[in-house]
Image (cartoon, grey):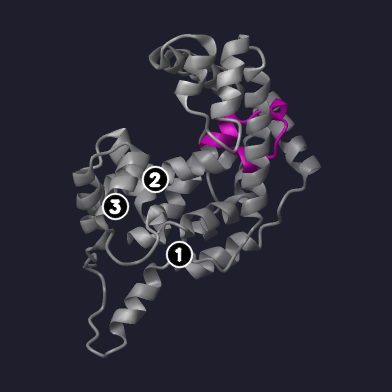
Amino acid sequence: MSIQLPAALANVGCFQSYLTHVNSIPALNEEQERTLFVNYQNNNDLQAAQQIVLSHLRFVAYIAKSYKGYGLPIEDLVQEGTVGLMKSVKKFSLNFGVRLATFAVHYIKSEIQEFVLRNWRSVKSATTKAKRKLFYNLRRLKAKTEWLTNQEIKEVACKLDVSEDDVTDMEVQLTQPDVYIDASTNDNEESGSMLMSSLLEDKSESFSTQLIQDDFTQKSLQQIREIVNTLDERSIDILNNRWLSDKKVPHKVFADKYGVSQERIRQVEEKAIIKIRKKMADYIY
């Protein structure tokens, strides 16, 4: 799908002007959104698709602002997020039973994260799935702003399934400041704090993001539970008590219960999870 956005969006001059512009675009209610999707999907009405995209640009901007801490131009983050939004519009179905924003958030974040990985200096070594997971979760897992202790490094490495050396290396890279070639020089005492404030995540807007995330989580869990209930009795027991409850029951408990090895329980669990992933992929895509 190729959509030509209004020229005003390309000439707004600065991010704040862009925000002002996209916030002036009326949001769609559920009935308007449904009508536009029917026109787009049944009649290939690109104007309807464009209206859908434009009405969600403020949502893209809000998500993009949460990635400012990586030091990349916010305009580029918004542009990548918009690509994700367009992809979600193309793949969305009214049969999913959710609003577009709930469905699109993961496409938007995926495009932005890929852009960050391609362009931010400290993630050029994040070539594996495990290291990418470490990159995006290390800051969240750090309980304080000081360096991680040896025990904390071990806990992070265990939680994210990476080596302790990977954790240490990534922490060093995340801690080292970036130097911006387009930054103006300023020798006054406040220059450092001003620079750091420009990198902090902007939390001034809510835009119902938490409600959208909660809605998606609840609907996904409901879908997963329905899939789990189609499995055999042993798989249901294992998944319900290891993944769908507050307390994760160890493999040994099920090994003793069913008279098999812990490795066999792990195999049963892994096979069941693969089935769920395949069915969830059919549901989402």
The residue at the point 59 percent across, 64 percent down is 21
CA gap, disc 1 to disc 2? Answer: 15 Å
Q: Position of residue 28 (x, y in %)?
A: 73, 49
Would you place residue 21 above or below residue 220 in this image? below
Q: Which residue is mark 3?
A: 151
Residue 271, given in percent of the width and then of the height, sits at 47, 13
Q: Which residue sits furthest right?
A: 31
Which residues, given as a range, are shown in magenta? 87-103
Task: Point out residue 109 in the picture as x, y percentages from the top left corner.
Answer: 47, 45
- Circle 2 residue: 113
* Residue nearer the viewer, 99 or 89: 99
Residue count near mark 2 (Cα–Cα under 10 Å), binned few <14, some 14–19, many ≥20? some
Q: Which residue corresponds to the image point at 53% horizontal and 44% vertical from the top-left?
A: 4
Secondary structure mainly formed by the magenta segment: helix
Q: Which mark is residue 243?
A: none
Q: CA distance from mark 1 to mark 3?
A: 28 Å
User: Is residue 88 part of the magenta span, yes or no?
Assistant: yes
Q: Residues within 10 Å of mark 1 (few under 14, many from 20)?
A: some
Measuring from the top left, give residue 64's x and y in whole percent.
Answer: 47, 55
Q: Mark 1: which secondary structure?
A: loop
Q: Secondary structure at mark 2?
A: helix
> In the rendered structure, which amino acid carries the disc numbered 1?
Glu
Q: Quadrant of residue 144?
A: bottom left
- Could you say which quadrant of the image residue 217 lies in? top right
- Helix or strand or loop: what does disc 3 sit on? helix
Query: Which residue corresponds to the image point at 71% horizontal and 29% vertical from the top-left?
Result: 94
36 magenta-colored: no
